[in-house]
Image (cartoon, grey):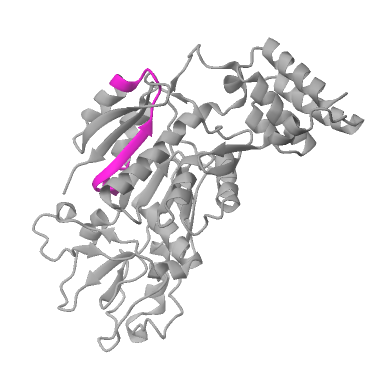
Amino acid sequence: MILREVLSKTKDHFTKLGFASAKVDSELLLATALGWKRLDLYLKQEYPLSDKELNDCREMVRRRSKGEPVAYILGYKDFYSIQLKVAAGVLIPRPETEHLVDEAINHCKETGLANPVVLDLGSGSGCVGLAVAKEIPNSLVVLVEKSEAAFKILLENVKLNNLEEQVIAINSSVEDFSDDVLKAALSEYYKKFPHKAEEVVELKVSDKHKLENSEDSPELLQKPHELEEQEVELVSDEVALEQVDNNEQSSFEEPVFETEYSLDRSQTQEEESLNFNSKSELNSRTDDYQVNNDAISVDKAEDFVNSAKDQIAKLKISDMSSRSVSRDSLRKSFPAIFDIVLSNPPYIEHGDKALAQDVLEFEPSEALFAEEQGTQFYRTWPDHIQSFLKPKSLLAFEIGFEQGQQVSDIFKAKSFLNNTSIIKDYSANDRIIRAYSKGE
């Protein structure tokens, strides 16, 4: 049988099954089965298929005929300017979601942001955050995804697109994402890529984020890996390290404490909590960072290591006149590092009869459905990450095409957001809710 006949019969078969994109599906599947580019199908219409090639094509057609999404059969999906691996357990990226990437790019152009720090909530395959990282080379993107199956694929996509140095991936629910989790992830990131210590990724603390009557609050929390010309003390609930020798100027190119972190999945949802597997140890780079050994006893050192299991050591920053910011003040200042927050959360109402059967049967339900008529995560996720927002940060969430007014009302009711608007997709459907954090 020649290729032209196989293509025609496959397209007719898919059309009878009611597939909306029967022609495209046929071409993609047959080209993949033959190991060709799609264009080759048009150039080799009279090509005679061997028995093996014909069987390979039939297997692709058989899987699609059972409703399996084309992307799962192919094993990949193109999204914006990148290609992503997809498989059962991860939501297949949709073209409409690309509008989130557009919003991030436009925001950077309008505000002059050259090196934004971006947060992608419920990242799934990583499509949104990775596309942003690819399009904005100086960005730092934090991906948060709770599904272990999806997170595994996300990590593969980071490597597939050579974005390891721009991306921090965290296996956590949004509800469990905290400043401690972020600090641990940043610590690992700078340990792995110490040269990033020289790049300009500043964590700014504006006057609006300082505590009242906090005269000593710094105007700038510098790079988390570098505090130039400042004396540094590490503080915990159990012990405080003695002040660094005044004759030594201290700086560190990596976080002084290195901590692995994971979520304890052995607990119930109600009891689920962060389980820090601490490997904390003093940085061995004593030529750069000198510690007065007389000030630290063995017992106190052990207490300090144990304390690190509960939370990462807090940095107490002193200026040259020995004025310092309180630990609470620093904690409240630290998380406000994100310029942009993006998300395509689950937003389909349970029982939605318009949902395609292949989506319902094959794609992960936890990535599709939400309570409260699909609005559950628009109500909770912005509140949870409020402390992470810089003033005038962009929030852009994908929404269902009939949810515009309802989600807009939800966002407008949040006191920390303003300038809420709805962005339509190329089909003139409501697709993105956009808002900005307040502040100067």
Residue 69 vs 246, above or below: the answer is: above
User: Which quarter of the picture shows residue 66?
Assistant: top right
Q: Is residue 177 left or right of residue 332?
A: right
> In the rendered structure, does residue 20 fall within the stretch colored magenta?
no
Q: Nearer the viewer, residue 128 or 209?
A: 128
Residue 255 visible? The answer is no
Where's the N terminus, which quadrant? Answer: top right
Question: What x and y, as percent, mark residue 297?
Answer: 37, 80
Q: Which residue is located at x 21 percent, y 73 percent? A: 318
Question: What x and y, as percent, mark residue 112?
Answer: 28, 52
Q: Which residue is located at x 40 percent, y 54 percent? A: 139
Q: Nearer the viewer, residue 217 or 45?
A: 45
Question: What x and y, as percent, mark residue 203?
Answer: 29, 59
User: Which quarter of the picture shows residue 414?
Assistant: top left
> In the rendered picture of this protein, how many numbered marks are placed on residues?
0
* Residue that protrudes farthest toward the left in the picture: 213
Q: Is residue 188 left or right of residue 17?
A: left
Q: Is residue 49 left or right of residue 271?
A: right
* Residue that protrudes farthest toward the bottom in the picture: 247
> In the rendered structure, does residue 393 fall within the stretch colored magenta?
yes
* Residue that protrudes farthest toward the right in the picture: 51
Residue 77 vs 118, above or below: the answer is: above
Residue 357 vs 46, above or below: the answer is: above
Q: Which residue is located at x 32 percent, y 50 percent? A: 338
Q: Which residue is located at x 51 percent, y 29 percent? A: 366
Residue 220 vs 211, above or below: the answer is: below
Residue 370 visible? The answer is yes
Question: What x and y, as percent, mark residue 105?
Answer: 37, 44
Stretch of the chain drawn in magenta: 385-405
